Every structure is written in structure tokens, then in C-alpha cells.
């Protein structure tokens, strides 16, 4: 039996490959908005970033995320993404934490 197929995506920061669910999807929506997509199903051009804060730093400030999304990332977008990222990880801790 083959192991179950896991989608692999590349982190925009470190260029390492990870299982998709280990990454946070950032989506450039059809309406032009930029945000974190917790469902992974939102329409638009997506890019993935792993959990490492350095990767977010690199992706957001080094321009690789903007390139991947083919969209300029404004100061507001950046602030929104950093907040959403913190929330995404905080929620995950809650759902995955011990009962
Ligand atoms: Zn990374």
C-alpha cells in the first residue's frame, strides 16, 4: 500500500517543501484583497509560508510573497497578514492542544 497522497507546497520564505497543511496559505483574492486563507479553498492566487517567523519576515519584507502573489503588498496588507498569521497559529494551538 502506498502512503496517502499529501499535497506538497513550497514555502515562499525558505523555499523548503512542506505538506500543505503545515503551511499557511496567503491568497490574493479576486477582489484584489490580500489575506490569510485558513480554509485553503479561497479563490485567487495563493502562496504558502511555513511556521517560521523568519520566513514571514522574508516573505513579507523581502518581496518574495509579492512576487508569488503577483500583487504589491501594502503596509496595511502586511499588518493584516501578520495579525492573521498570529491568529492562525493561536487557533491551531487551541484545536491541537491537550484537552
Ligand atoms: Zn519557510
Image (cartoon, helix red, strand yellow):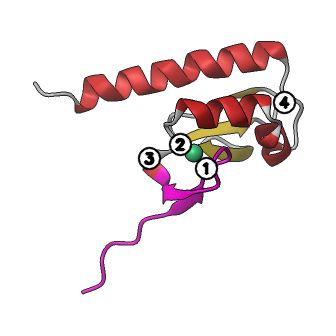
Report, in whole angstroms, how far the alpha carbon at label 1 lies from the one at label 2. 6 Å
Left or right for 25, reference 44: left
Residue of label 2: 50
Would you say residue 36 is visible in this rendering? no
Q: Residue 9: x and y, percent? A: 57, 58
Residue of label 4: 32
Q: Residue 78: x and y, percent? A: 74, 20
Disc assigned to residue 22 = 3
Disc on the earlier residue, 4 or 3: 3
Taking the view exactly as shown, the residue that stands out farthest to the bottom is: 1
> Mark 1–mark 2 contact, CB under 8 Å?
yes
Residue of label 1: 11
Would you say residue 73 is visible in this rendering? yes
Disc on the earlier residue, 4 or 2: 4
Residue 49 within the segment the image draws in magenta:
no
Disc on the earlier residue, 1 or 4: 1
Report, in whole angstroms, how far the alpha carbon at label 4 lies from the one at label 2. 23 Å
> Mark 2–mark 3 contact, CB under 8 Å?
yes
Q: Residue 23: x and y, percent? A: 51, 44
Report, in whole angstroms, how far the alpha carbon at label 2 lies from the one at label 3. 7 Å
Q: Is residue 14 above or below residue 1?
A: above
Q: Is residue 2 above or below residue 97?
A: below
Give the label, 4 or 2, closer to the camera: 2
Q: Secondary structure at mark 1?
A: loop
For the record, the magenta segment spans 1-20
Taking the view exactly as shown, the residue that stands out farthest to the front is: 54
Ligand 1 within 8 A of label 2's CB?
A: yes
Q: Secondary structure at mark 3?
A: helix
Report, in whole angstroms, how far the alpha carbon at label 1 lies from the one at label 4. 22 Å
Disc on the earlier residue, 1 or 3: 1
Amino acid at each position: 500500500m502506498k502512503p496517502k497522497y499529501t499535497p506538497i507546497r513550497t514555502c515562499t520564505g525558505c523555499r523548503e517543501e512542506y505538506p500543505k497543511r503545515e503551511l499557511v496559505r496567503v491568497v490574493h483574492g479576486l477582489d484584489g484583497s490580500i489575506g490569510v486563507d485558513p480554509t485553503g479553498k479561497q479563490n485567487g492566487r495563493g502562496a504558502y509560508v511555513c511556521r517560521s517567523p523568519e520566513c514571514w519576515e522574508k516573505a513579507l519584507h523581502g518581496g518574495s510573497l509579492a512576487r508569488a502573489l503577483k500583487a504589491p503588498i501594502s503596509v496595511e496588507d502586511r499588518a493584516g497578514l501578520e495579525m492573521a498569521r498570529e491568529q492562525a497559529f493561536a487557533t491551531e494551538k487551541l484545536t491541537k492542544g491537550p484537552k
